[in-house]
Image (cartoon, rainbow, N blue to C red):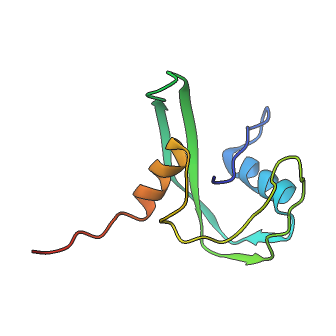
Amino acid sequence: MFPGGRKRARESEKDCLRREIKEELPKLKLGRISLWKEVKARNKRSGRKMSDAIFIAKSAKGRLAIGDKKEIDRAAWQKPRGIRLTPTSRYIRDRLFPRKRRRS
């Protein structure tokens, strides 16, 4: 699953992202971040509203040391295909890394 969190009162989306990364993966340092896409949809199975701001970091340095074991049980760099994802994470993966179409 991709990292996530909830925005606090009077906190910008970028500030929220940086705070969440610092809490969950304190040894990871992000370079310049920019908003890639905002996703507002309804989960087809549960009917629950989903609202996500998806950012791209120009760079990431450091280790994937876990800050709060209650939040994350493990962290690893993964290739975008072949991992089990939530519907929101699958949407993000498929937009960031579309499958290459083979020419006939």
Residue that extends furthest to the top in the rendered view of this protein? 47
Residue 63, image x and y in percent? 81, 76
Residue 55, image x and y in percent? 58, 56
The foreground one among 57 and 74 is 74
Does 65 appear above or below 71?
below
Q: With 42 as the anchor, is 10 left or right in this view?
A: right
Q: With 61 as the anchor, is 46 left or right in this view?
A: left
Q: With 86 as the anchor, is 101 left or right in this view?
A: left
- The residue shown at (78%, 71%) is 29
Give the number of marks: 0
Q: With 96 as the anchor, is 10 left or right in this view?
A: right
Residue that extends furthest to the left in the rendered view of this protein? 104
Residue 85, image x and y in percent? 55, 51
Quarter of the figure with the C terminus? bottom left
- The residue shown at (69%, 47%) is 4
- The residue shown at (48%, 40%) is 39
Does 9 appear above or below 16?
above
Does 74 appear above or below 5?
below
Residue 103, image x and y in percent? 14, 75
The foreground one among 53 and 49 is 49
